[in-house]
Amino acid sequence: MRLFNTTVTPEGKQLVNESLESTFISAGKMADKFEEELKPWIGNAVTVNSGTASLHLALEAADVRGGEVILPAQTFIASGLAIIHAGAKPVFADINYMTGNIDPKSIVSKITDNTKAIMVVHWGGNPCDMDEIGQIAKEYDLVVIEDAAHAFGTTYKGRKIGEISDFTCFSFQAIKHLTTGDGGAVCALTNENVKKLKKLRWFNIDREDDKPDILGERAYNSNEVGYKYHMNDIAASLGVGNLKSIDGKLAKHRYIANLYYRPELGHVDGITLFDKQDDRNSADWLFGFHVERREDFIRMMKSNNIPTSVIHLGIDKNDLFGGLDETLVNQRKFDKTQIHIPCHDGLNGEEITRIISTIKRGW
């Protein structure tokens, strides 16, 4: 049994083979096709070669250099590193202990004259409090960047994640709902920012308008730093193919989380489930909860060949970010009690039942 599952569809394999046989394998028609097919799911998507690249590009487009960006520590280190890559300082806000998502009230307490943006992380695929965060951003004239690495296919109050904030960043890394092997996408609300992102991802050269001249050279004159972050057609082909089954994959995650785990584990002594809000639709990429005597729980599950893991401990602990911040009270509590169990489309009914019955027997 695995904690995560990687899905590669037959359609994905076929399209990858077709791209390889064509020998057109850099950014081309399949990358363009993938962006078009992502639109119904997440909006105006600009594909890139990793989720980290998507965060970095969004931060560069938001012009945060020299300023501060507020984010939760409950995330993977990539979120904080992208801010440093963009020449800004990460400032950590506390989280809601019962969701793992950033606390809007804590955001306000962290705002200074140097704050330029708020980066929210939709923990486990459950959307943050975007109305409250959007209002804070409006009041203080801040850019909102959503780290939606866990949240493909989710909605908040009927709006798609990808069509709410200035920028929204997705990861298509191997174990995500939708994978391109590795890859990502940045969504922007305005055509101006979409164009800016497309230039930044390819050396700050406009591939659409700066056509090669008779000498074979593009007529460009770069005035700012650009990057080589574009997605190639091999990865895009896998993405296009895997999109064919994304409805079923999302449905399986939600089915396991909401029809099995939540009703069966919600009353088990020693377990407190994370909150589920009715006004948003989680992707249920993770299924986590708070557990008493966590190490005993982990040992018991391991003895029954069931994987578990914390995902992740607060990244503020890293010296790069200044070290453990004891003022993040809920983060520190979360670090001590959170645990996650398998929740993915590779699980069969017998395995789901075994996970539940094992936990119910106690630890």
Image (tube, rainbow, N blue to C red):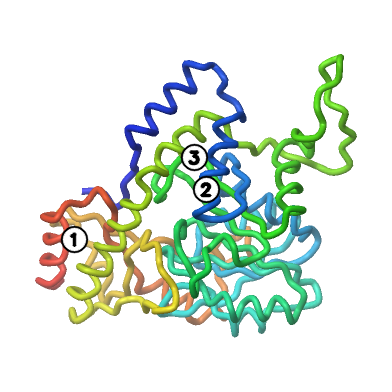
Could you tell me which secondary element the residue under label 1 belongs to?
A: helix
Q: Amino acid at mark 3?
A: Asp
Picture residue at 86% right of the left edge, 15% below the top: 214
Pick whichever of labels 1 and 2 is earlier in the sequence.
2
Q: Is residue 232 above or below residue 269?
A: above
Pick whichever of labels 3 and 2 is earlier in the sequence.
2
Q: What residue is pinned by disc 2? A: 38
- Whether residue 348 appears in this view of the structure is yes
- Whether residue 326 appears in this view of the structure is no
User: Could you tell me which quadrant the C terminus lies in?
Assistant: bottom left
Could you tell me which secondary element the residue under label 3 belongs to?
A: loop
Which residue is at the front of the view, 28 or 264? 28
> Which of label 1 and label 2 is nearer to you?
2
Which residue is at the front of the view, 114 or 317? 114
Q: Amino acid at mark 1?
A: Met
* Pointer 2 local density, CA inside 10 Å: few below 14, some 14–19, many at least 20: some
Name the spot of residue 295 as percent of width and height, x first: 26, 67
Q: What residue is pinned by disc 3? A: 182
Name the spot of residue 313 as percent of width and height, x first: 45, 64
Q: Which quadrant of the view contains residue 118?
A: bottom right
Q: Is residue 324 left or right of residue 144?
A: left
Name the spot of residue 208 as percent of width and height, x first: 75, 35
